[in-house]
Image: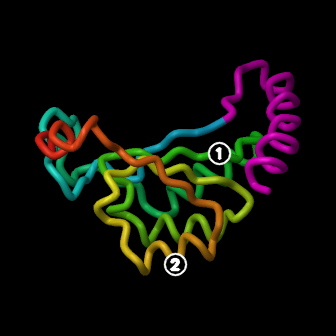
Amino acid sequence: MNLGYGAAFNGTRTIRENREKYKCNIPWLILFDPTSACNMHCIGCWAGTYGHKYSLSYDDMDKIVREGKELGVYIYMLTGGEPLVKKKDILKLAKEHNDVEFSIYTNSSLIDEDFCKEVQKLGNIVFQLSIEGFEETNDGRR
């Protein structure tokens, strides 16, 4: 429903109206990094160089989504670092904004049974798993 009605039907109409109103491009999705922190130190990944310095508060993430919805954006791509370092905030955000889809780019190492149960209950989170090729390449990098 979120992707079909919220994003495609309602969002697209609102985006078009706001493009005219504000005389600028309105994106169909918003990408943001909840944190630059990561629980891994993969070879070649930029996140390892930033450490745990940069992180959005729950209020900042909530503001991004609230203001995005006002513009007609109903799809949010969360990247990082490792976004699931802030999984409690992400679950709270998904519950508060159950009319949007959250697509999370993750190394998947912080996905556990309890988290999966919460994600299933909410129904508006999807995962994009970071895999760097076949097993030998992937494991060698990590």
Q: Nearer the viewer, residue 133 or 17?
A: 133
Q: Amino acid at mark 1?
A: Ile
Q: Residue at x 16, y 32 (%)?
A: 44
Q: Amino acid at mark 2?
A: Lys
Q: Label 2's element?
A: helix
Is 59 magenta? The answer is no
CA gap between label 1 and label 2 equals: 22 Å
Is 13 magenta? The answer is yes
Check disc 1: other Cα within 10 Å, few if <14, some if 14-19, many if 20+.
many
Q: Residue at x 28, y 61 (%)?
A: 109
Q: Earlier in the sequence, mark 1 or mark 2?
A: 1
Would you say the magenta stretch is mainly helix, strand or loop?
Answer: helix
Q: Which residues are magenta?
A: 1-28
Query: Dot 2 corresponds to which residue?
Result: 117
Q: Residue at x 36, y 73 (%)?
A: 112
| Residue 49 sits in quarter | top left
Relative image position of residue 57 (x, y in whole percent) = 43, 61
Query: Dot 1 corresponds to which residue?
Result: 75
| Residue 10 sits in quarter | top right
Q: Nearer the viewer, residue 93 or 139?
A: 139
Relative height, residue 98 to residue 1 (above, below): below
Please identify the residue farthest to the top as the structure is shown: 23
For the N terminus, the quadrant is bottom right
For the residues carrying marks 1 and 2, which lies nearer the camera in this image?
Answer: 2
